[in-house]
Image (cartoon, rainbow, N blue to C red):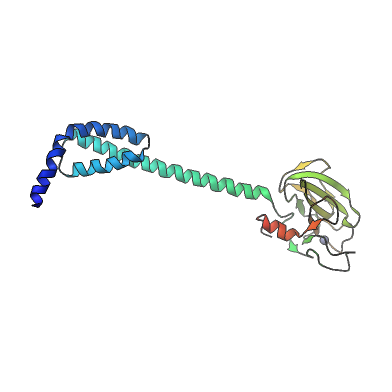
Amino acid sequence: MRKNSTTKNRTPKFVTRGRAAVVGGGMVAAIALGSTAAFASASSHESFLASGSTSSVSAAVHQQAAGQKAAAAKAAAKAKAAHAKAHHKAHHKAHHAAWVTPTTGYVLGAGFAQAGPHWAHKHSGQDFVVPSGTTVRAAHAGTVVTAGWGGAYGNNIVIKHGPHLYTQYGHLSHIGVYVGQHVKAGQQIGKSGSTGNSTGPHLHFEVRTTPVYGSAVEPLHFLRAHHVHV
Ligand SMILES: [Zn+2]
């Protein structure tokens, strides 16, 4: 019964062998174009050959098809990996260019809305305690709208990032930018100090919705919401 079945199956396959070689040639071309339909016919073609055909033409086509199938699969995997890598890199870079801490090597000092004897009202920013002369950098790209003496803030800088978004940097020992200057995220804008109403070297940092005092938001919450580890 089993043998009969095999014989019965084999007959039409030998009959169509010549056509299979032609079809196989077309299939190779299709594979080169990356057709998944071609992969499906490659599988049925393989089972046909496995059933006993010894045609050298078919075998050569099969070998070529298998090789191209493997090459196509390898190229597709490589392209997919390259795309994923590029996407990850762009994503990572975008985050890095977005927001950064206004200084580095700091210890967090007085926080937002903290009450204290040094402030007429509650503390309007976040203090980053650093030695005097530490690099102060733009937390985000923008345009400098204030660069000079700011009373209680001492030497201070305000950068506009958007219609309702500003950052302020106070008590500086050195101002390195001018009004109207465009700065990039992370670019040095000055050096920390203790000018104005300050009891010791630190950077007073504010995030505001306007350029002036009274519109500050919680800066640490803001930075963390913008993927900054602070
Ligand atoms: Zn402060």
Point out the image quarter for the C terminus. Answer: bottom right
Residue under the image location 23 percent in, 31 percent down: 22
The percent position of residue 30, horizontal first and vertical second, equals: 33, 34
The percent position of residue 54, horizontal first and vertical second, equals: 15, 38
Q: Is residue 202 left or right of residue 7?
A: right
Image height of 80 relative to 154, above or below: above
Q: Quadrant of residue 10?
A: top left
Residue under the image location 35 percent in, 41 percent down: 36
Q: Nearer the viewer, residue 203 or 224?
A: 224
Q: Is residue 196 left or right of residue 219?
A: right
Q: Is residue 113 visible?
A: yes
Image height of 133 relative to 65, above or below: below
Residue under the image location 28 percent in, 40 percent down: 41
Q: Is residue 105 visible?
A: no
Residue under the image location 61 percent in, 47 percent down: 93
The percent position of residue 137, horizontal first and vertical second, equals: 75, 50
